[in-house]
Image: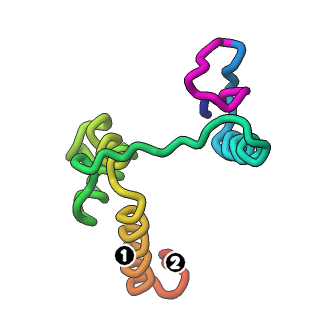
Amino acid sequence: MEIAHVNGREEDNAPENKIWTCRSCNVRCGNALRAAGIGRLTRQFNPASRGAKSLGQWLTAVLSMKGESTAMSVPDAVAMVRGTRPEDRSDFAERIWTIRRRRYGPTGRAT
């Protein structure tokens, strides 16, 4: 769940301008408002210094977030995942699937 701004302006924090919505609906609403020339485009903030620099760091953070590792605190793991550049996230996902396909075959899933 996310908070959406009815008029498309995030700086307008009046209670009547906020609604709860799922991510998909919030994105669709934002796209419709932008197409109508309403609201303003926002950018995701990913601090460069806190992101994962290697696949190992990424996996440690993800497993810690899921409660499958105690190597990091959950808040630190969340900060690392959020701080990782989108390009690096894509690279890590591609590398993980390459390893899985080598291990399990074309589906990448254990049988």
Residue at mark 2 to residue at mark 1: CA–CA distance = 21 Å
- Label 2 crowd (10 A; few <14 / some 14-19 / many >=20): few
Seen at 44% across and 83% down, the residue is 101
Placement of 42 over or under 109, stated as above or below: above
Figure quadrant of the N terminus: top right
Q: Position of residue 83 (x, y in %)?
A: 33, 47
Closer to us: 12 or 64: 12
Whole-percent x, y for residue 91 in the image: 38, 71
Residue 77 in sight here: yes
Question: In the rendered structure, which disc, 2 or 1, sits on the residue that comes first in sequence?
Answer: 1
- Residue type of the residue flagged with mark 2: Thr
Q: Name the one closer to the observer, 66 or 88.
A: 88
Q: How is the image coloured?
A: rainbow
Question: In this view of the protein, which residue sits in the foreground, 86 or 56?
Answer: 86
Q: Position of residue 62 (x, y in %)?
A: 35, 52
Quick one: which residue is furthest to the front in this view? 37
Would residue 9 be found to the left or right of residue 88 on screen?
right
Residue type at mark 1 is Arg
> What residue does disc 2 label?
111
Is residue 78 positioned above or below 63 on the image? Answer: above
Q: Residues within 10 Å of mark 1 (few under 14, many from 20)?
A: few
Q: Nearer the viewer, mark 2 or mark 1?
A: 1
As drawn, is 29 to the left or to the right of 15? right
Q: Which residues are magenta?
A: 5-15
**Residue visible at 68% across and 40% down?**
26
83 to the left or right of 29: left
Residue 63 in sight here:
no
Provide residue 84's location: percent of width, then percent of height.
33, 54
Per the rendering, the mark at residue 95 is 1
Lateral position of residue 31 relative to residue 107, left or right = right
